[in-house]
Amino acid sequence: MSELLRVEELIKHFPAKKRGGLSVRAVNDVSFTVNEGETLGLVGESGCGKSTLGRSVLRLVEPDSGRIFYRGTDLMKMRDLRKVREKLQIIFQNPSGSLDPRMLVRDIISEGPRIHHRNVSRQELQELTGRLMREVGLSAEYAECYPSELSGGQQQRVSIARALALDPEFIVCDEVVSALDLSYQSQIINLLEALQTERGLSYLFISHDLAVVRHISRRIAVMYAGRFVEVAEAGELVKHAFHPYTRLLLRSIPIPDPQCGRRGTAAISAGSVGIGQAPQTGCAFADRCKWARASCREEEPPLREIAPGHFAACGLV
Ligand SMILES: Nc1ncnc2c1ncn2[C@@H]1O[C@H](COP(=O)(O)OP(=O)(O)O)[C@@H](O)[C@H]1O
Ligand SMILES: [Mg+2]
């Protein structure tokens, strides 16, 4: 598998809200690669920096520093991103918020090509829209609808069709199923997987829900307070999680076996880590870690390879 995207030492801090406060280290020295046709899952609780990372990779949020190589070219050094933007797309959690309520579905889907390819004819746009709607499983009658006339799942299909319109290679999927009912969630996941197979797409698939991420991802990165604390292949991560935070996330997944009886305890409540409040020295997780030693509060553990292809940032390695 060849490498499509390589991110090195990416940093994005936000200024402190209060004077004299600490700046928010939303993305704090993150490196990773995504191969062609691969899904990298990104999981972590609300506020840990996932969206900032996803947007920074596309420079929709301007990183403070770092390198972002797309097919070998450093996006951080590019002045005009228009040409690569077509190939790098993003889909958001809340389709009703990201779809213009005054535009018809067909115009939303064809907007990208209309803007980027000025000489494309009306008929070509119409054909493209029809093709994309079929591809994402939307019946043609919705072309003349407004987003508000569609269900959440259908709206998310419109977002996907719009992202596909410029024939991308890489899509950041930021909590794309989090706002949907369970039945729609699996439909959208299945659709994304089918599109990946047909088009050879690569995804950075972001969710606070490890149960969702583990199904679609080949590899998973676990983020805590702006850093990757564990990265491994999905099966390996679930079976041999090393980092105490990953184990905490795993315990909060509902257990699918009904005989087991025990449902997940939802140990991770939204927003329970204000990353502004995470300790500024040593391991950011130390305050919540029952195994933390004095040394954990002194030195920030680097991400180290603890088994082939399995990385963890923990002082207990
Ligand atoms: N534009 C911004 N200005 C200031 N702080 C921000 C901004 N965007 C995000 N943050 C802060 O950065 C941290 C990470 O946010 P975010 O990337 O949205 O996390 P996640 O997607 O994992 O929930 C949070 O503390 C959030 O408040
Ligand atoms: Mg987010």
Image (cartoon, helix red, strand yellow):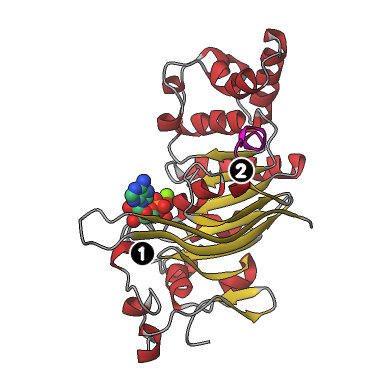
The answer to whether marks 2 and 1 mark residues whose Cβ atoms lie closer than 8 Å is no
Q: Where is mark 1, residue-wise?
A: 268
Q: Is residue 257 visible?
A: no
User: Ligand 2 near label 2 (Cβ, under 8 Å)?
Assistant: no
Q: Where is mark 2, residue-wise?
A: 171
Q: How many marks?
A: 2
Residue occupying the point 20% across, 57% down: 19
Report the span colored magenta.
79-86
Lateral position of residue 134 relative to residue 11, left or right: right
Check disc 2 and give the amino acid type: Ile
- The answer to if 74 sits in the magenta stretch is no
Relative to residue 187, is residue 120 depicted above or below?
Answer: above
Q: Looking at this view, is 123 or 251 the one in front?
A: 123
Q: Is residue 55 visible?
A: yes
Relative to residue 282, is residue 9 depicted above or below?
Answer: above
Q: Residues within 10 Å of mark 1 (few under 14, many from 20)?
A: some
Cα separation between marks 2 and 1: 27 Å
| Residue 141 position in % (x across, y down) | 58, 14
Lateral position of residue 249 relative to residue 276, left or right: right
| Residue 91 position in % (x across, y down) | 53, 39
Q: Looking at this view, is 56 or 144 the one in front?
A: 56
Check disc 1 and give the amino acid type: Ile
